Image (spheres, rainbow, N blue to C red):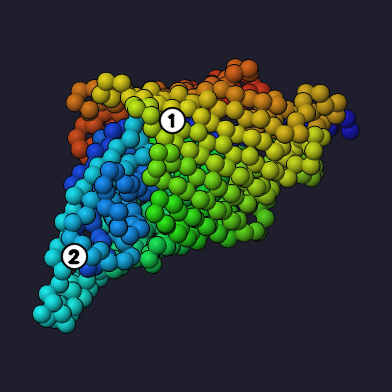
Amino acid sequence: MLQMGINISCYTRRALSLAIIFASLSTQLAHALIIGEIESISREGEPLLAYVQIFPSNPDEKITTSCFSLVKVGQAEPDLPAASLELEGDRNIGQRIKISTATPINTRLLTLPLKAHCIPHGLIIREFNLELKPAPNTLFPQAESVSTQAEKVDVSFLQKPELSGSIRAGYFSSSRKLDGKNDLGTSSIWLKATQNIGENVSVVAQGWIRNDETFRADADSKKLQEGYIKFSTENVDYRIGRQIIVWGRADRLNPTDNLTPRNFTLLTAEEDDQRLGSLAAKITYHSHENSLTAIWLPGMDPHIFPVATTPGIFFTQHIPHTNRIALKFDHSGGNVDWSASYYSGLDLTPDIAIGATTLSGTNIIFDHNRIHVLGMDAATVIGRYGLRAEAAYTWTANTGENDFLVKKPFLYMVMGGDRTFLDYLNINIQYYLRHVTNYSDPQAITDPLLRPVAIQTGALWNQFSRSQHGVSIRISNKWFNETLEGEIAAVGSFGQSNYFIRPKLVYAFSDNVKGSLGLDIYRGDNNTFFGRLRDNSLLFAEMKYGF
């Protein structure tokens, strides 16, 4: 019996050592952002409706609505009602910021200072002096009203949907599923469609169809990443459906980002494409520079991570049926942008339990337990330096020092900054710390069956030691009239030495065609977080045509 237990322990340890979770910790650096001209649609006496074109210098740069806000600069218009900002379009065909108010504007001249405050290498403020169209004809108001309504109907219901996307072909030296497959050719189509219904209602859908083993029909897959309806009433924005919700102001290491999952097995050159949406109802109330967001998620889709097939081991996943909720207060537009957030729901990353042992093998259970997360983040700009900090404390279902199969409560914090030198050389450095509550050393366990499992789970969840700290570094530059971009991103832990490095080159053959070439390199001892991911090291190359 003891021998059987030792064999089961060996199989279990091998299986756990191949469970790859949280593999992707680096992406492209943000780059320069150009704010274009403003176009006013509304008239004096009507709610404001205007559009501002934006042009990221790198089409792969991820820009979100939360990057922008209206601020007061000098004698900026003091009577402007609370305005709603919304990012429209797609980076492949062009993006614009929609600026709107729920109440009428009773003046023809406005000053709108638009602030881009999440650009890593500096603060951008563009001040627009806007002149609204004249008020409607007061001699024939009824005719003007009928004409205006007719125009609205034409614009709202006859407008074609906005369609954008990309076609991609790639090579990856190995799979990210730990299935032993190498030298894979990939092909995929990524699509996003937006249909505007009136001025305040839109339907958005995006997803992909792909084949990770070209010319094999059984390797086809498809995924709807997002599909939701959004609308606004006065100062409140609503969004209902499958959606991607991203929280955090730190550079990619985000302790507060706990709401929607990732697919860590996806073969893509862009890390943000691994994000998946979750069914949610999201309500945001805006008041000047502040906003309050409430989110209800009726279920959960967990992270997708690779697990290798091991003789004598089979895996099951346990996801309880429960509601999840999240709240966030955000302040954007002053000298310091900050937010405070709370999440109560299931953990996207599972704990590990040992199930029944039968003649066919041992059952390893990925069990998603409830967690509570209290977080804060902040960002500011001092001269040419952008500074950021983010921290969260997570309460877990762990019962104490002797509970080694459920993640222990922990504090996770990140702080750092960046600066751009010359024209395009950007350097970003962050320090991170993880501190574990109720810690006890898994190597001190005397139980010969529990000890190897506890060591493996402790390493998987970065809880092998009481405190773990390290740095992340990202350096990027551009050459040849901005057609060639290079970056190197790295994350390393002190103490138990282990690290991840991703060098990457992107070349723009034209406005629509780009090629990427890069490496993912994981190194470290077998009982370290990055050392376990050594088999996920690979070379990748991808061509992308955007439309």
* Whole-percent x, y for residue 134 in the image: 13, 65
- Residue drawn at (23%, 51%) of the image: 111
Q: Amino acid at mark 2?
A: Arg
Q: Residues within 10 Å of mark 2 (few under 14, many from 20)?
A: many
Left or right of 325 in this view: 251: left
| Numbered label attached to residue 387 | 1
- Residue drawn at (51%, 50%) of the image: 329
Viewer-side residue, 340 vs 442: 340
Q: Is residue 274 visible?
A: no
Which image quadrant for residue 453?
Answer: top right
- Residue drawn at (55%, 47%) of the image: 341
Viewer-side residue, 83 vs 175: 83
Q: Is residue 130 visible?
A: yes
Q: Is residue 478 above or below residue 92?
A: above
Q: Is residue 313 above or below residue 2?
A: below
The secondary element bearing badge 1 is classed as: strand
Q: Is residue 444 above or below residue 55?
A: above
Left or right of 492 in this view: 352: right
Which quadrant is the N terminus positioned in? top right
Give the residue number, with chain letter if any, for mark 2. Answer: 43
